[in-house]
Image: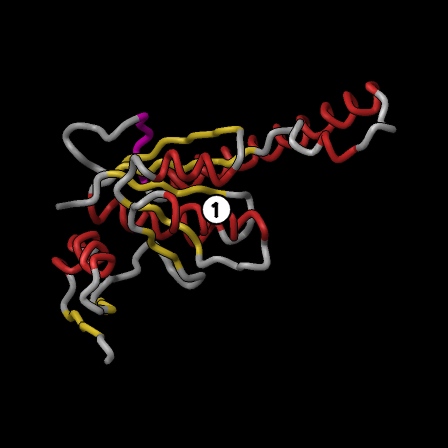
Amino acid sequence: MTIRTLLVPICGGPEDHAALEMAANLARRFEAHVEVLHLRRDSREGMPYLGDGASGAMIEEIIVATEREADDKASRLKQQFDKWRAAHAIAAAESPPTPGGASAAWRQEIGPEDQVVAHHGRLTDLIVLPRPDLKIDLASLVFESALLRTGRPLLLAPSAAGPNTQFATVAIAWNGSAEAARALAAARPFLATASRVIAITAN
């Protein structure tokens, strides 16, 4: 078992950096393909909250302004993605190349963040996210969807993580359940290269 595909949902916050650095590390380690997914909000999403007093012209103006802001954000994030890929010498590819090697692709989708993450997450080997700040609604929503709705392993990157972070010591929280067994199986690529593995259990 190995890791061939990684999904990194990004929201445009400073916390994205840790997840991208960790993804670069893993892409080189496992010769994996990284899908960096920009979650773009639908500009019409907030229209029902304007109420009956809003005129058509006002609504159109708000939509145009929101779209412009979303375009600017998407352009900025795409530039950051290109710089990140170049800095780590990761090849641009729409799908995992043959033979292997680290590669990455930029994806952008409009829609409810939890549904988009759930859909893409189910089709990947590992989802990489920054350690969540649960005070941030969007980050919390993405984290919960990845954890509870994909059925795939999730790696949370600490803010101090870098592209050369090692996984020399791995701890396993074991209680004999099916969930623990599934998590253990998903962690096998990390266990295979670890110099020390600790199993933790409690009665």
Q: Is residue 119 left or right of residue 32?
A: right
The image quarter containing residue 149 is top left
The residue drawn where x is 42% and y is 63% is 160
Quadrant of res 73: top right
Give the image location of residue 94, x and y in percent.
32, 25
Residue 110 percent location from the top left of the image: 53, 28
Quadrant location of the C terminus? bottom left
Queried whether the magenta region covers residue 91, the answer comes back as yes
In the image, residue 65 lies at what x, y percent? 73, 28
Q: Which residue is under mark 1?
A: 142
> Between residues 55 and 165, which one lies in front from this camera angle?
55
Q: What secondary structure is found at the residue carrying circle 1?
A: helix
Q: Is residue 136 left or right of residue 117?
A: right
Q: What stretch is highlighted in magenta?
A: 89-94
Q: Residue at x 22, y 67 (%)?
A: 172
Q: 82 above or below 182?
A: above
Circle 1: is it few (<14), some (14-19), or many (20+) Cα within 10 Å? many
Q: Whole-percent x and y of residue 139?
A: 52, 50
Nearer the observer, 90 or 71:
71
- Residue 183 higher or lower than 175, as above or below: above
Q: Which residue is drawn at 68% across and 27% down?
A: 68
